[in-house]
């Protein structure tokens, strides 16, 4: 092999080596690990279960995603806050249950509702305009009639029953939609 051929071969091998090194480096840094892929799959299954109203599957998936949550130690300040308000600190580590599912379902519902109700906003970045649209929707749909005492007056319930007192309407508009729209 002559000197020119050796230089060309060396250069080609060098470029090939650098290319392989860069490809490996990129894949190590930016590719998802099996754990990440599994977490993404479980998260997708959790969201799908919440959207379908399947509490059993949603709770199963969230316990796979966050298995150590019920065994975590809450901050001292959190425990004190709960106890000062008459709530047992055991509530914090009770694990996920139907009340969590109801919160997830309601949040998902109101997030979608807020997006659809504010689509007609001329200025998508104007929170005031969006809030006016949301308040008008609540005012037009939820009539100021009390909900029967045997029904928990959640925002979700008030929206579907189309009735609730003023504080329910305000809570419905400000608590649910503002959080899901602007956070």
Image (cartoon, rainbow, N blue to C red):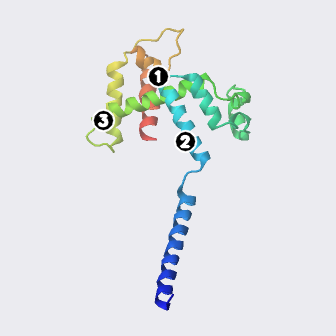
What distance separates the C-alpha of mark 3 from that of mark 2?
29 Å
Residue annotated with mark 2: 40
Q: Badge 1 is on which residue?
A: 155
Q: Is residue 126 left or right of residue 84?
A: left
Bin the neighbour count of mark 1 within 10 Å (Cα to Cα): few under 14, some 14-19, many 20 and up: many
On screen, 181 above or below 170?
A: below
Residue 44 x, y percent position in the rendering: 51, 36
What's the distance in space between the residues labelled 2 and 1, CA to CA? Answer: 30 Å
Are the residues tagged 1 and 3 within 8 Å (C-beta)?
A: no
Residue 106 percent coordinates (x, y): 49, 26
Classify mark 1: helix, strand or loop: helix
Residue drawn at x 56%, y 44% as measured from the top left = 37
Of marks 2 and 1, the one in the foreground: 2
State the residue in front, 15 or 67: 15
Q: Which numbered disc, 1 or 3, marks the residue that appears first in the sequence?
A: 3
Q: Are marks 2 and 1 in contact (CB under 8 Å)?
A: no
Q: Is residue 183 above or below residue 93?
A: below
Question: From this viewpoint, is residue 161 visible?
Answer: yes
Q: What residue did someone put label 3 on? A: 119
């Amino acid at each position: 092999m002559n000197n020119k051929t050796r230089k060309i071969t060396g250069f080609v091998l060098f470029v090939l080596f650098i290319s392989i090194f860069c490809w490996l480096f990129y894949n190590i840094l930016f590719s998802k690990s099996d754990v990440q892929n599994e977490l993404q799959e479980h998260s997708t299954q959790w969201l799908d279960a919440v959207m379908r109203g399947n509490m059993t599957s949603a709770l199963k998936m969230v316990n796979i995603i966050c298995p150590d949550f019920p065994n975590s130690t809450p901050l001292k300040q959190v425990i004190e806050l709960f106890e000062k308000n008459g709530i047992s600190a055991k509530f914090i580590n009770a694990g996920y249950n139907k009340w969590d599912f109801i919160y997830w379902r309601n949040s998902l519902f109101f997030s979608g509702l807020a997006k659809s109700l504010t689509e007609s906003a001329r200025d998508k970045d104007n929170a005031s305009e969006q809030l006016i649209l949301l308040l008008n929707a609540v005012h037009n749909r939820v009539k100021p009639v009390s909900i029967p005492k045997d029904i928990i007056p959640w925002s979700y319930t008030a929206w579907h029953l189309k009735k609730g007192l003023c504080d329910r309407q305000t809570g419905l508009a400000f608590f649910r939609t503002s959080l899901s729209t602007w956070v």
